[in-house]
Amino acid sequence: MGDLWIGNVEESTTDDEIREFLCRYGFPPYDSIQRVTGTGEHPAAVVTFDSIEPHVLRTFQPRIHNMFWKNRTLVVQVVPERNET
């Protein structure tokens, strides 16, 4: 399972728009999405891919990191693996 942090997402962007955007740049459809509002200035989304490992996501991440989309520059990072026991 791999998680991708997409920061500085335009607040009005829908989950479907994020899915379409990612698929346009070669990502598979994500399995779940969680919105992170923070202080409201730089909303983010964490998308989870159940069958994709983080090392695979790292090969896709440069395709959209620092991309200008919907009047914002995206900050995209692969979330480090968590050891949940």
Image: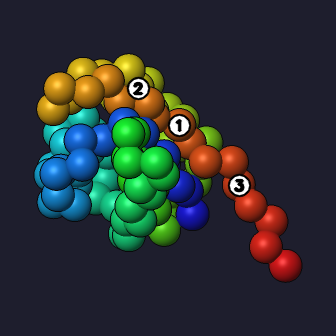
Residue 7 tag number? none
Residue at x-position 23% and y-position 41%? 10
Q: Quadrant of the C terminus?
A: bottom right
Circle 1 — which element? strand
Residue 77 tag number? 1
**Residue 20, visible in the rendered structure:** yes
Q: In the rendered view, would you say 44 is above or below 59? A: below
Q: Position of residue 40 (x, y in %)?
A: 38, 48
Q: Position of residue 8 (x, y in %)?
A: 37, 36
Most foreground residue, 4 or 8: 8
Q: Quadrant of residue 26?
A: top left
> Could you tell which of marks 3 and 2 lies nearer the N-terminus?
2
Name the side, left or right, on which 60 lies relative to 22: right
Circle 2 — which element? loop
**Residue 60, visible in the rendered structure:** no
> What's the distance in space between the residues labelled 1 and 2, CA to CA?
8 Å
Q: Are marks 1 and 2 in contact (CB under 8 Å)?
A: yes
The amino acid pointed to by label 1 is: Gln
Q: In the rendered view, would you say 22 is above or below 61? A: below
Residue 81 tag number? 3
The amino acid pointed to by label 3 is: Glu
Q: Quadrant of the N terminus?
A: bottom right
Q: Which residue is mark 2?
A: 65
